[in-house]
Image: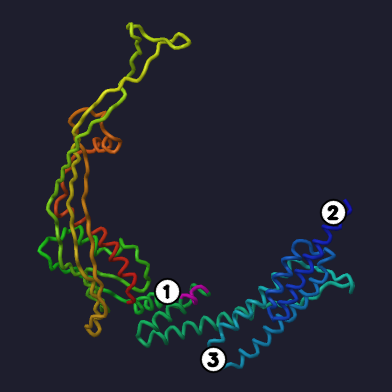
Amino acid sequence: MKKITLFLTGIFLITSCSSAKKIQREISYGNYDNAIEFALKKLRRNPTKKSNQPIIKMLEKAYDKAVAQDYRNLEKYRIDSNHAVIEDIYNTYLNLDRRQELIKPVLPLHINAENRNALFIFKDYNQEIQNSKNSLTDFLFANAKQLLSKNNKKNARKAYNDLRYLKQLNSNYKNVDSLLEEAHFLGTNFVNVTLINDTQQIIPMRLEQDLLNFDSYGLDDFWTVFDSDKRENIKYDYELALLFKRIDISPERIIENTISISKTIKDGYEYVYDDNGNVKLDSLGHKIKVDKLIDVTANFHEIHQEKASHIIGEVIVTNLNNNREITNFPLESEFIFINDFGELEGDKRALETAQLELLNHQAVPFPSTEQMVYDTGEDLKAKLKGIIEDIDF
C-alpha cells in the first residue's frame, strides 16, 4: 500500500512539474494569455492544492505582463495615424476585460509562502469598450460609404464585409440595413443564361426549364445571380450560353439469344432392388433408397432491349462589358436505356439462377425520343453544375 501511495504521489508531482514548465515556457515566449489559460485549467480543479502553489505565482506574473503589454499597445495605437487601429483598440479593451473575468471565479488564491492572496488589479473597462466600439462603428460606416462611392464590385464587397461587421456590433446603427443591400447589389455579378439549340431535334420544354432553373442547382455563390429571363433594370456582366450542337438518338434495338439447355436433375427417389426383385434393406432393416435422376431440357430466350441518346454541347461565357468570350467548356452526356428479360420453352428446372431471375422481368415499351433527351439532360445538368462551379465570375 505504501508503494502505491508513493507511486501516485510521484505521478502527481511529475504532472504538476510538467504543467508548471509549460506555463513558464509560454511566459518566456511572451504568450501570456496562453499561460493564463493553462494555469486556470489547473487551478479550477483544486485551487488550494499544495502542488499548485507555483502555478498561482505564475498566473499572477502572466496576468501582470499581459495587462502591461496591452497598455503598451494601446499607447502605440493612440499615436498611430492609421484608422485601421481603431479595431485594434476595441479588441484590446475587450481582451483586458475578458482576461480579468476569466480569473475572477478562481479567487481568492492564497500564496502560502508569503502569507498573502495573489494580487490581480482589476478595472472597469465598460466605458472604454463602449467608446472604442462607437469609434469603430463610425469608422466602419464611413469607410463603407467611401468604398461604395468607388462604384466597383471589389470595393462593394469590402464595404459589405465592413457593414456586416458593423451590424454585429450595433444592429440598429443608422441605415446599415439599406447600405448592406446596396453593397450586396453593387458587388454582385449578374449572369444572363441562354440556351441555344443548333441541333435538328426538339429539346423538351421541361428539360429546357430544368436546365435554366438555377435555383435547383444548389449553387452556393453569394455574389453571383443567374437569370434566364432578363430583367430590364439589371445591367448584366456576363452571358452564359448553353449551346446544343448535336443530339443523336440510336434506333430501338432488340437482341435475342436462344440457348438450348439440358440438365440432369434430382426428381425424388427410388428404392434399390436385389436380383430377385425385392427391396434391399440396410443393416437396421430400413429400405434402401437413392436419388432418382432425370434429364430435363429447355430453350431459353434471353432478350435485350436497348436505346441510346447522346448530347454534345458547349458552355460559352462572354464578358458583356467588352463582348469578349472569356472561356468555353465542352459539354457531353449519354443515356442508355437497357432492359433484359427472358422467355422459356421447356422445363423451368433446367435453368440457372440468373436465367430464372430474367424470367421475372418483362418487355417494356421503349422510351420516346423526348424522354430519352430529357433523361440525358439530367446527367447534363449535373455536369453543367460542375462547370459553373469552376468558373470564376
The residue range painted magenta reads: 164-168
Q: Residue at x 69, y 84 (%)?
A: 69
Q: Residue furthest front?
A: 275
Mark 1 or 3, closer to the camera:
3
Query: Which of the marked residues, 1 or 2, is nearer the chain's N terminus?
Result: 2
- Above or below for 309 versus 69: above
- In the picture, the disc for residue 82 is 3
User: Closer to the camera: disc 1 or disc 2?
Assistant: 2
Does residue 359 lie above or below 207 as drawn?
Answer: above
- Mark 1 lies on a secondary structure that is helix
Locate residue 145: give its quadrant.
bottom left
Q: Nearer the viewer, residue 230 or 206?
A: 206
Q: Is residue 167 magenta?
A: yes
Relative side of 10 to 155, left or right:
right
Q: Quadrant of the C terminus?
A: bottom left
User: Where residue 238 sits in the image (x, y, percent)?
Assistant: 26, 77
Q: Which residue is mark 1?
A: 177
Q: Which amino acid does the dot numbered 2 rest on?
A: Ile
Q: Position of residue 20 (x, y in %)?
A: 77, 71
